Image (cartoon, rainbow, N blue to C red):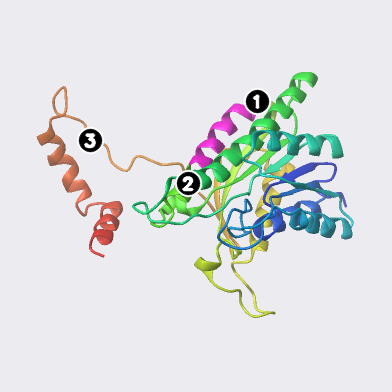
Amino acid sequence: MTLPLAGLTAVVTGAGRGIGRAEARELARLGAAVVVNDYGKPGHGGTSHAEGHGGGSGDASAAPAESVAAEIRAAGGRAVAHLGDVADFETARGLIDLAVAEFGKLDILVNNAGILRDRMIFSMSESEWDAVVHVHLKGHFTTTRFASEHWRARAKATGAPVYGRIVNTSSEAFLAGSAGQPNYAAAKGGIVGLTTSSAQALAKYGVTVNAICPRARTRMTADVFGDAPPPGAADPLSPEHVAPVVGYLASPAASVVTGQVLVVHGGMVAVMERPRVAAKFDTAKDVFTYEELESLLTPHFDGESFAAREVLSLRRG
């Protein structure tokens, strides 16, 4: 039986541990050759650039990426490791170039690298804001920039669309808010904007661009979800619940799926709607006055909508 990703090449960032590792292994299982990227800093609370890796501190190490690549090769697949911070422009260029040099072309890009620097907005430092936006949002941009350039050049050379898939990693922190993560929520919201914009720009070249909002137990989320269940017990927050959705979005079966955001965890996939108009008000005159807006909007937000009830609930403690 032909595997759905046979003959295709994938890059997965932040793939040394956690969600990225599960995604890289799944893409390889489905037949893709995989470039396993990871910045490889150990520990929790420092400067690692891998989602599901923890915060990280110490010197960068190739060991996590090399380990995952070795696992894939041991299972009969093809994989190479790449060490580097994908938020660095030239490092991202080199990552895409490595995929082309090793396997002839790039077909799939999974952007997963990220860090946490949690703090309430009134306590957050400039460096904590900049670090998270840099790694998450810029790290998605840089790889997308060079992958899309590769696909556009190939499409222009052949005069026909190419096979291209991008799967980005957003978060429910963007969808529902997260009080102690203003930097993370903002970066993840930016990733959704990058996703929908890129989907429109790249459609004519045959490239789809989607985002997932995964919920998984990793070193980066240990403080949120706690320890894993005992050995042998099912874990609804295992990263292995996320990986098959990425495999699907990377496959030919998902050729009509683009510009979408999917929440994924524990055997559940939710396809999110784009924001819709909840209420509309027109002025009775040519221009709104303060008094007219007060008479229309205050009653709407003061308990007449779900959003208003949520705000009031937050205010009341």
Gap in angstroms between the C-alphas marked 3 and 1: 38 Å
> First in sequence: mark 3 or mark 1?
1
- Residue 199 among those drawn in magenta: yes
The percent coordinates of residue 76 (x first, y second) are 89, 56
Which structural element holds mark 2?
helix
Which structural element holds mark 1?
helix
Report the residue at 51% width, 43% height from top.
Answer: 133
The percent coordinates of residue 45 (x first, y second) are 55, 60
Give the main secondary structure of the magenta stretch. helix
- Give the magenta range: 190-203
Taking the view exactly as shown, the residue that stands out farthest to the left is 291
Gap in angstroms between the C-alphas marked 3 and 2: 42 Å
Position of 296 relative to 202 (above/below): below
Label 3: how many Cα within 10 Å (few below 14, some 14–19, many 20+):
few
> First in sequence: mark 3 or mark 2?
2
**Which quarter of the rendered picture does the C terminus lie within?**
bottom left
**Type of amino acid at the residue the image marks with label 3:** Phe
The percent coordinates of residue 210 (x first, y second) are 60, 42
Position of 267 relative to 276 (above/below): below
Which structural element holds mark 3?
loop
Q: Nearer the viewer, residue 290 or 223?
A: 223
Residue corresponding to mark 2: 127
Q: Residue 204 carries which label?
A: 1
The percent coordinates of residue 11 (x first, y second) are 74, 44
Q: Which mark is residue 281?
A: 3
Report the residue at 10% width, 35% height from top.
Answer: 291
**Type of amino acid at the residue the image marks with label 2:** Ser
Label 1: how many Cα within 10 Å (few below 14, some 14–19, many 20+):
some
